[in-house]
């Protein structure tokens, strides 16, 4: 039950763009980067708003990798 | 308790009635022959990007998560925020590995992880190990969904003694069991849409309205005790709280997608492309989970634990009552009904998918492998429907008669157990290099060591590993996965040396893994 999109061929092989995923791993799995209260944003300590911001950045990176590898 | 909140209860019952109707009506949605297991249990693999987003989101971000993560922030502080990095690093894995698994499962008609492992390695015992691990790890997870439901029912003021006290929970569960039986995966998929919209509304209302009442984020965080605000800085020769935080996030991420209910939801997508798109779209839920974690701090700021009207709730449910108490304290009654319905319905969606996933596993990889090797498709689907009922009844009995803390302990152990299936499943999606018996022994050693390590720490997730002069406290699941991988790799080399160049069994070929 392949969709037409599948038949046009999805990317299957390795792409160097996948290395961009490492950015989000390093950004959130190394707590010394963000385990601090300052600078606060709207009263929210850095620790919290930084990690929430990383969610957005990670989603953008993933979308970018999707678009560029799907072409 | 403080008496029944009739306005909230009415809204709650109304929304529950709506999703009950929806659950049964779903049988006719994208209609298929529900006497086929892949139609009942995977909804015919017909869900596009958007429905997959609702389904996987509704499945992975469970009611228990929405109660327990803020409760952890409320009780333990910053460490609860590990849920954010956890749900960030899980998506590259979804993007890279699961489209491959989707393609091979689609090509060969595989429905479960056990099916894939059986085909890839030709070893029924390895497939059995994967299957049993999946079922055992899922059962307490279903039970915990009921805890989420119990907490909001308690928050609505429904209480009583003996059988009467449990009636609302039993009724909710009968509804769940009935629509899962009749509609299969289509039921939670359609209900997930309602649930997720309600949860988003609740989360954003909580994060905007409550800080305004409490005088802003600055004031809320100023009231959080210093030791709860940030992670403790590690001492000399130790990775301390930093290592624990990072390994907890990474280990949980590696484990999450291995759960049977994750695979069931992912395999019901209509293409590998829909899965990849979702890796970019699902972080929407991660953001909301992060916001909800903050709600734990709001509950601290509002001082709900000290308010007399919530004393009974905290006594009964502990910190899990923090969020319901805050909602009761801050929201008008009708919106409390909406918020609690979001959590209550949020319990039913994953519970339905988990019971379907466990039923698929039992049917395909235990019954059809070891008991009745040639069932008709109709017998197979019928058996799965019955097993889904048994699985849910088991979870209900567990939660009614066994103290909640044991369900929580078992769920923590479940994470350690399920991660041991990573080498066969995730690495298996890329290479057949590992020897199947080596994988089985690696699984056994990882499972045994993980269980023993967790019990030695009174079932706390972090194990205080010592290497030379260094203290490396970290998530037990993560460490035992490394052990499992090393054992499997070394034994593969040994077995290969012993057996020479004999060909390996593999029902799949490289081109099965992509379009």
Image (cartoon, rainbow, N blue to C red):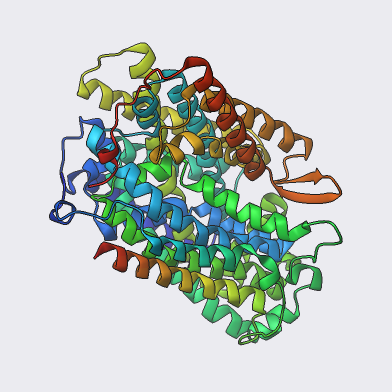
Q: How many marks?
A: 0
Q: Residue at x 36, y 41 (%)?
A: B264
B40 is higher (above) or lower (below) than B292: above
Q: Residue at x 75, y 74 (%)?
A: B224
Q: Nearer the viewer, residue A63 or B36?
A: A63
Report whether A5 appears left or right of B215. left
Q: Residue at x 50, y 25 (%)?
A: B129
Q: Nearer the viewer, residue B314 or A26?
A: A26
Q: Residue at x 62, y 74 (%)?
A: A48
Report whether B503 appears left or right of B30. right
Q: Nearer the viewer, residue B105 or B439?
A: B439
Among the 4 quarters of the image, the one containing residue B34: top left
The image position of residue B189, as x and y in percent, is 31, 51
Asked if residue B156 shows in the view, the reply is no
The image position of residue A5, as x and y in percent, is 17, 57
Asked if residue B348 shows in the view, the reply is yes
Q: Nearer the viewer, residue B46 or B511?
A: B511
The image position of residue B227, as x and y in percent, is 80, 68
B507 is higher (above) or lower (below) than B87: above
> Which quadrant would the N terminus of chain B be assigned to in this image?
bottom right
């Amino acid at each position: 039950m392949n969709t037409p999109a599948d038949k046009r061929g999805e990317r299957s092989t390795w792409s160097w763009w996948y290395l961009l995923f490492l950015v989000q791993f390093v950004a959130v799995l190394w707590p010394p980067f963000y385990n601090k209260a300052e600078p606060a944003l709207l009263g929210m300590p850095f620790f919290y708003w930084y990690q929430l911001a990383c969610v957005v950045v990670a989603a953008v990176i993933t979308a970018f990798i999707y678009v560029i590898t799907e072409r | 308790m403080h008496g029944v909140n009739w306005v909230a209860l009415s809204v709650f019952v109304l929304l529950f009635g709506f999703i009950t109707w929806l659950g049964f009506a779903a049988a006719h949605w994208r209609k298929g022959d529900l006497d086929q297991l892949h139609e009942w249990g995977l909804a015919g693999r017909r869900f596009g990007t958007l429905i997959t987003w609702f389904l996987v989101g509704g499945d992975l971000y469970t009611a228990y998560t929405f109660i327990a993560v803020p409760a952890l922030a409320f009780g333990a502080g910053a460490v609860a925020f590990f849920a954010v990095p956890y749900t960030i690093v899980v998506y590259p894995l979804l993007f890279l590995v699961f489209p491959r698994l989707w393609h091979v499962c689609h090509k060969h008609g595989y429905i479960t992880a056990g099916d894939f492992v059986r085909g890839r390695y030709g070893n029924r015992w390895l497939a059995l190990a994967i299957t049993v691990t999946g079922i055992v790890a899922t059962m307490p997870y279903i039970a915990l969904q009921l805890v989420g439901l119990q907490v909001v029912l308690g928050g609505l003021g429904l209480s009583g003694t003996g059988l009467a006290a449990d009636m609302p929970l039993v009724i909710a569960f009968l509804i769940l069991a009935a629509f899962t039986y009749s509609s299969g995966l289509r039921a939670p998929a359609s209900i997930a849409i309602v649930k997720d919209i309600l949860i988003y509304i609740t989360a954003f209302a909580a994060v905007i309205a409550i800080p305004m009442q409490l005088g802003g984020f600055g004031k809320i965080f100023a009231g959080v005790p210093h030791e709860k605000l940030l992670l403790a800085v590690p001492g000399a020769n130790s990775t301390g709280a930093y290592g624990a935080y990072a390994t907890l996030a990474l280990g949980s991420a590696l484990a999450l997608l291995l759960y049977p209910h994750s695979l069931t939801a992912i395999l019901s997508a209509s293409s590998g492309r829909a899965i990849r798109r979702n890796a970019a779209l699902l972080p929407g839920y991660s953001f909301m989970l992060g916001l909800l974690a903050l709600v734990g701090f709001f509950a601290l700021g509002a001082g709900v634990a000290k308010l007399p009207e919530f004393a009974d709730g905290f006594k009964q449910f502990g910190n899990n009552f923090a969020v319901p108490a805050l909602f009761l304290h801050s929201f008008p009654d009708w919106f409390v009904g909406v918020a609690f319905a979001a959590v209550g319905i949020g319990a039913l969606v994953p519970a339905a998918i988990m019971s379907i996933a466990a039923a698929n596993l039992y049917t395909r990889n235990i019954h059809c492998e070891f008991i009745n090797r040639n069932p008709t498709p109709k017998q197979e689907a019928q058996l799965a429907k019955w097993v889904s009922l048994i699985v849910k009844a088991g979870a209900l009995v567990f939660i009614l008669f066994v103290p909640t803390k044991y369900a929580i302990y078992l769920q923590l152990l479940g994470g350690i157990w399920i991660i041991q299936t990573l080498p066969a499943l995730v690495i298996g999606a890329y290479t057949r290099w590992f020897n199947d018996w080596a994988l089985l022994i690696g699984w056994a050693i990882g499972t045994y060591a993980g269980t023993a390590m967790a019990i030695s720490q009174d079932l706390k997730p972090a194990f205080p590993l010592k290497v030379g002069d260094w203290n490396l406290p970290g998530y037990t699941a993560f460490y035992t996965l490394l052990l499992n991988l090393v054992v499997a790799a070394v034994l593969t080399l040994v077995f290969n040396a012993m057996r020479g160049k004999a060909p390996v069994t593999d029902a799949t070929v490289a081109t099965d893994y992509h379009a």
